[in-house]
Amino acid sequence: MKHRSPAVRLFAALIAFTFLAAGLPGNARAFVKDVANFTLENGMQVVVIPDHRAPVVTHMVWYRVGAADEPLGQAGIAHFLEHLMFKGTPSNPNGSFSKYVASVGGQENAFTSSDYTAYFQRVAKEHLADMMRLEADRMENLVLTKEVVDPERDVIMEERRSRTDNNPGAQLSEALEATLWFEHPYGRPVIGWMNEMEKLTLDDAISYYDRYYTPNNAILIVAGDVDAAEVKRLAEETYGKLKRRAEPPPRVRPEEPVHRTHRMVRLESPLVTQPSLTRSYVVPSYTTADREGLTGEAEALDLFAELLFGGSTSALYQKLVVEDKLAVSIGGYYRGTMLDDGELVLFASPAPGTTLEQLEAAIDREMAAFLKSEITEETLARVKRSVIATSVYAQDSQQTLARVFGTALTTGRTVDNVLTWTDRVRAVTADEILAVGLKYLDINQAATGYLLPASAPSRS
Amino acid sequence: MKHRSPAVRLFAALIAFTFLAAGLPGNARAFVKDVANFTLENGMQVVVIPDHRAPVVTHMVWYRVGAADEPLGQAGIAHFLEHLMFKGTPSNPNGSFSKYVASVGGQENAFTSSDYTAYFQRVAKEHLADMMRLEADRMENLVLTKEVVDPERDVIMEERRSRTDNNPGAQLSEALEATLWFEHPYGRPVIGWMNEMEKLTLDDAISYYDRYYTPNNAILIVAGDVDAAEVKRLAEETYGKLKRRAEPPPRVRPEEPVHRTHRMVRLESPLVTQPSLTRSYVVPSYTTADREGLTGEAEALDLFAELLFGGSTSALYQKLVVEDKLAVSIGGYYRGTMLDDGELVLFASPAPGTTLEQLEAAIDREMAAFLKSEITEETLARVKRSVIATSVYAQDSQQTLARVFGTALTTGRTVDNVLTWTDRVRAVTADEILAVGLKYLDINQAATGYLLPASAPSRS
């Protein structure tokens, strides 16, 4: 359905740059200073982020379940449920929730990632109570029948056809992840594998809904022109009436074996005009760094990514695009907001006359040189300003602000962890940044993808 | 333990060449003409292969369970159970079964693959009844305690350390399979991933034993100086007394998604002296070809593999080793005796001065040329003779003979299917051989591994 965004792993990456920071100057600080955080009696967590710039609210419900929690053989069920949640309940049938949002000039959306599934509406503040009533209703009373499930299965399959199966870049990306992760379900696409999607049944949908869509597995986030007391009262009247329908199992996913090889994936297609390469390294996420006592490594990885390939001032861009003219583009990011391990991702397109093999060799050479270089105080200060500023600007969007908390709370972190992020980034030293680079830029923890026009000459 | 072979996927490949054939001339025919096949009341299948050349018997029990049937997160449990089966029962404690076999000058062994687990002894015929009594005893009465399980876990972990973790070729092979298969458990090593092996518990072992070690999941194969009536009587007195302890679940494994990329795995190690490459294509097995109505394709693949890279007379060997001198070795095989899909595997080592990239490009070129070539009647007759002769010679080993039936019956085929194999191979045409080549030599259904000395120059 057009009004809903697809299941996107990439989203998690964007969020890495949009951590909300406390203790910031000016407006940014003004609207995050009173973040409230409490839990209803049935276990539903609530976060309230006052933002009085306009009389609107962003209302989100996040579930601590995503594609990496799916039963084996049911890849795609998390995203399928996201679609089915728009179908209706006995009190609000036939998409009447969506119609109501549209009728009051609101916006709505939903998204599924490996680690979470979320639903949101942005409406004038007077409609908040209705949003909460309707969202609570579909958490408990969703009607799942063959008549609802069968046609929607066709919809998600068509979504996969148009977004992945007809898109060489998406195909490569999917294969790259599957190759990077041998056992962990991060290797499975959020949208699902077609051969499993086509077999998803009504019973699968019901079991999944009954197991995970329960208030004790959900987080309510309200950002906007509200105060915590008001949200608490409304939440107790709506979500607070829901019973705990299940106790979701611990989120323990299969772990990766030790990796000892560099993996590569190659896709040639007539649909490709510009060759490109992508490389992902498995690295700790914010959550696994904490879990494993690797204090500060995630913050250092955020800065490392920014320094190495995070934009046009980055080391790789300056050397390979500006100076040597071997590449027409280079970029990358740290995907750190995951429940399990994260990824350091870089991508590049070669300049005409340069092969992907040559570009990859140049990237490896320059990364090695970077790890031997010195990060000056000036560079360190600049990159910290840049990373922190990105997160400050992101707060201008009420929706982004709410997403930052939702992502953190569904991937093993806390409100406090979000609020102290800036301070932790400020404390990172140049040595710590180079240390995580040396530790994690290990080719045997990486997979590299080549996207090539079908007519490209074969390798040397 | 030294007297038992390791868990080997490769074994299945060998079997592809050792199908037993009916209607063969001379001695070969003599001892396969009276193969008997019946089922005990508790569901245990029995195959008797009379072979009166010497007063010895090969006694095997095969279970329809292997590493591809393991619960998620317990990679290695199938092989672990294989080890634990040697520990003892109340009636025959402390390895007394093995001691007995040794005391009568017998041999014993056990092996685990993705699709089966088997135990065998070769003894003088008068000890057959005792073998059956002892093997039946451990099918039902194995003692599994913490005292037994904990030290044996150290043994399998040490086995993995010495066979895989210290062996770059084994590491590459493991990563290649994991990269070839995104979802199917054939992508997991039979020995297990170390991080899962170290967590295998007593409870895991008990559940696995109770679920799969039951007569209705087992096949008795006796080859040797016996007749069917005698084996039947002994089997009823031993195995026939066992109760059905469980109904093992259907062997439905996760299926592969559609593949659209060529995957590559690269391992550099100072332990490597001779570079080599390995490439595997996913193709139908004998069983899946039948299941999917692809009649004759598996037989054609057996001949295709032999023609293309099956020995020193093969097309690739003649061209690249003998004529162009780009390679010092080339070989390959069709791994067709699997419950789910099989693999077409080729491997090669470059001559000094040739890179793996150059050799791979040459192999691709020569394979394409082969698919456009014509197979003469003479060549076709030669390759059929060669493939059939291999299976005939294999019958000289009583153990191989028994293995052929055990493998077939645990991977979805029948005794009759084994006995008619020669006729089916004889019926394959040259066009059918080239057709399976054209159909299955699709680079996007393949993974290629490079094994390189650590000091090798990086790619061009």
Image: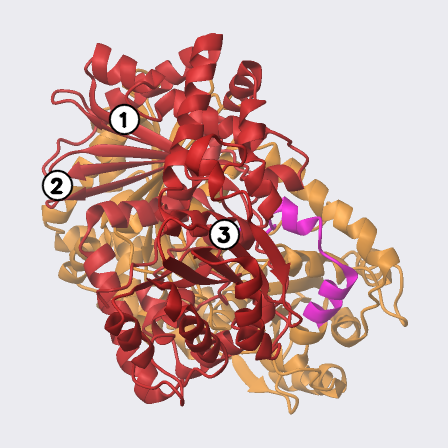
Chain colours: A red, B orange
In primary-sequence order, the first of circles 1 and 3 is 3
* Type of amino acid under label 2: Ala
Instruction: Please state the horizontal and vertical placement of residue A37, each as a whole percent of the image.
Output: 60, 55
Answer above or below: position of B196 versus B411.
Answer: above
Residue shown at 52%/76% (left/top)?
Answer: A238
Left or right placement of residue A119 versus residue B441 in this view:
right
Instruction: Please state the horizontal and vertical placement of residue B432, each as a whole percent of the image.
Output: 17, 62
Work out whether disc 2 and disc 1 sit on a shared chain. Answer: yes
Evaluate whether residue B296 shows in this view: no
Q: Which residue is mark 2?
A: A454
Residue shown at 71%/56% (left/top)?
Answer: B200
Dot 2 falls on which chain? Answer: A
* Type of amino acid under label 3: Ile
Answer above or below: position of B84 versus A303.
Answer: below
Residue shown at 42%/66% (left/top)?
Answer: A78
Q: How many C-alpha atoms fall within 10 Å of the one at disc 2: few (<14), some, or many (≥20)?
A: some
Q: Which residue is mark 3?
A: A49
Nearer to us of marks 1 and 3 is 3
Highlighted range, magenta: B188-209
- Residue A165, image quadrant: bottom left
For label 2, the SS is loop
